[in-house]
Image: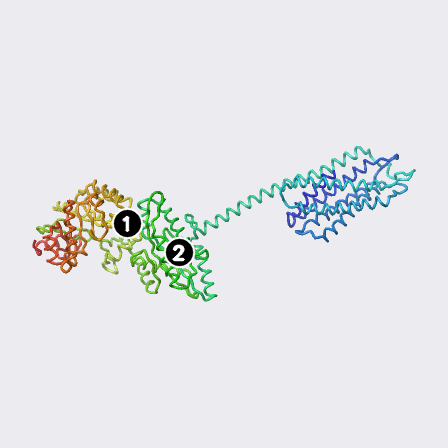
Amino acid sequence: MAMLASYTALDMAARVAATEGKAARWWLAGGSFAMGVGIWSMHFIGMLAFRLPVPMGYDPAITVFSLLIAVASSAFALWIVCPRRLSHTRLLIGALVMGSGVCTMHYTGMAAMRMMPPIHYRASLFLLSVLIALVASGAALWIAFYLRSRVAHLRLLRAGASVVMGIAIAGMHYTGMAAAQFPIGTTCATAHSAMDTGWLALLIIVFGGGVLSIALITSVLDLRLELRTAALASSLAQANRELQFLALHDSLTKLPNRALLEDRLGQEIQNARRRKSCFSVLFLDLDGFKQVNDAFGHHIGDLLLVEVAARIYSNIRASDTLARIGGDEFVLLAGVSDPTDAASLADKLVRSISEPALLAGHELGVSASIGIALCSGGNADAQEILRNADAAMYHAKTMGRNGYAFFDSSMNDDAHRQLNLLHDLRLAQEHGELVLYYQPKFAAADNRFTGAEALLRWNHPIRGLVPPDQFIPLAERTGLIVPIGAWVVDEACRQMSFWHAAGHPGWSVAVNLSAVQFNHPGLIGMVRDALQRHALDPACLTLEITESTAMRDADSSLVILQQLSDMGVRISIDDFGTGYSSLLYLKRLPASELKIDRGFVRDLDHDTEDAAIISAIVALGRTLRLRIVAEGVETRSQQDFLTQLGCDSLQGYLLGRPVPADQFHAAVAAAATQVPA
């Protein structure tokens, strides 16, 4: 019983120390009662084991009072071990009070027998019992404090400590019993009220054991509930941390997102304002990323984004913040105050990103355009700084891409105009503002009309006729070129079908394809649908792609062009001579004509090198059995030279300017009569 009471006491000490507030008070009260009952039960069972050659009994009131002393002593013991630290002074006071309480309980229980004459105690054994009680109490308090925390092998250590404490408690009791002296002729005043000691022992064992068992079971169940609650709380905390991370970071690259970037940018502005310092914001946009996505799929594009993020991260300091705020847009918040250092960092990033990347068996290449905004003294807000860096990035793109540019105030005006233009461009097709102009092409030999090239124009309600070089790059950069290009092909096929029905079955039309449109996976289906919709013979449609577009990924271009050629559509290589072609691939492309760039024709009268280049292109075309078309013909001498050289078709302002469809017949007739062969 003493060992069970000790084990319960150690367990209760842990429960009291582990709880706070009202729950701690309840555990202190319940633990005190269970521990007190356990110690008292051991004491009383030991008393019942004592035999005298006279009838014996126990005064109920005094016996109950001894039980209260045990409970009070236990409460004090549990209270002593509650604090985080157990000082030597506190341990000594606790041992004195608890030891005195145990001794008082024992000798009060002895007094409950009411012996006549009173019990006489041997002084040496009495003092030894008190010493045992004090030492045992101090040891018990120290052990309870040490074992109250959950350490490895806790239950085994607690069981061993319970054995030691139980022996100490029993040792005090039997030492005190050995100190008792009963003179001959002693009688018990309460003998007449005594019940059978066997039944009384059984009752106390059941009562004490039941109280201790209930306390232990309650403690174990509560501990399991606490552990489960703690596990749930830990899981919830982990889930909250993960949700917070996802809310503030990009799921693909694990970099901070726009929300976290703006928070850190705001903090950096405050620091710069307080310290009168400067920092830099670099806005990075990948050039050619959309083409990679279109050609290889989003999975490869995601791998490329992760690779680019890793390259950027390897070139910055740990104190810098790199964030991904869009599809292929990154923002770097760098503690760089000197423009030269910012330029050096941007140049290092441009060179690192432009290096080819081998991903999933594909060698991919992109470049970066970087805009740099310097913030001095924290005089701007976060949104303004980001807008400035964004404007500088777009300026870097207009300067040729794969480079960087610093922000100046004029860029904001240009960026604002670009945003307004983009907004209007998104609505232009819906509002019917896009129109096709047609420029005639003539046979060089006899000035016979051979076809027309469809050229896109934007008739803006306020700006008037917007030049293509102002809105086509914007459409390509934003992806609007895909739906706009589909409209151009459809409208050109519709118009040509109309002219065929009007009595011109031999006419054909050429349409330019941008690089973005050419690499779009829906190109083949879009062309096929347009031809079927307007019942146009595929041979009457010529699709022009630039030399650089065709050679960017020659193998992929070969597959796409072959599909178009198998459909019956004619292929023209535009701007020939301006790119870097491999003759090995060029001869494999299913093209039907080469188109000489206007740059060679423009200076033909004064530059013999251009004449030599054109001669070489014509000779190459004849060797490959391709038709040769020269554009940009503006003078009679240019026409004569190109005709004599052997070009098949000519087009240019000399022969006919681009005009709307309703003026095309008149333009063709005028050109045929005014410019002799």
For the N terminus, the quadrant is top right
Query: Residue 367 vs residue 546: left or right?
Result: right
Label 1 to label 2, Cα distance in Å? Answer: 25 Å
Residue underneath mark 2: 331
Identify the element where label 1 is drawn: helix
Judge the density around disc 2: few (<14), some (14-19), many (≥20) Cα neighbours within 10 Å: many
Locate residue 261: give its quadrant: bottom left
Instruction: Determine which of the numbered discs, if any, sits on residue 516 in the image.
Output: 1
Position of residue 555 in the picture relative to residue 7 (left or right)? left
Q: Nearer the viewer, residue 39 or 376?
A: 376
Identified by mark 2, the residue type is Val
Query: Where's residue 335, x and y in %?
Result: 43, 60
> Tag 1: residue type?
Val
Q: Is residue 61 visible?
A: no
Taking the image as drawn, is residue 386 in sight? yes
Mark 1, residues whose alpha carbon is within 10 Å: few (<14), some, or many (≥20)? Answer: many
Q: Nearer the viewer, residue 91 or 674?
A: 91
Q: Residue at x 25, y 53 (%)?
A: 432
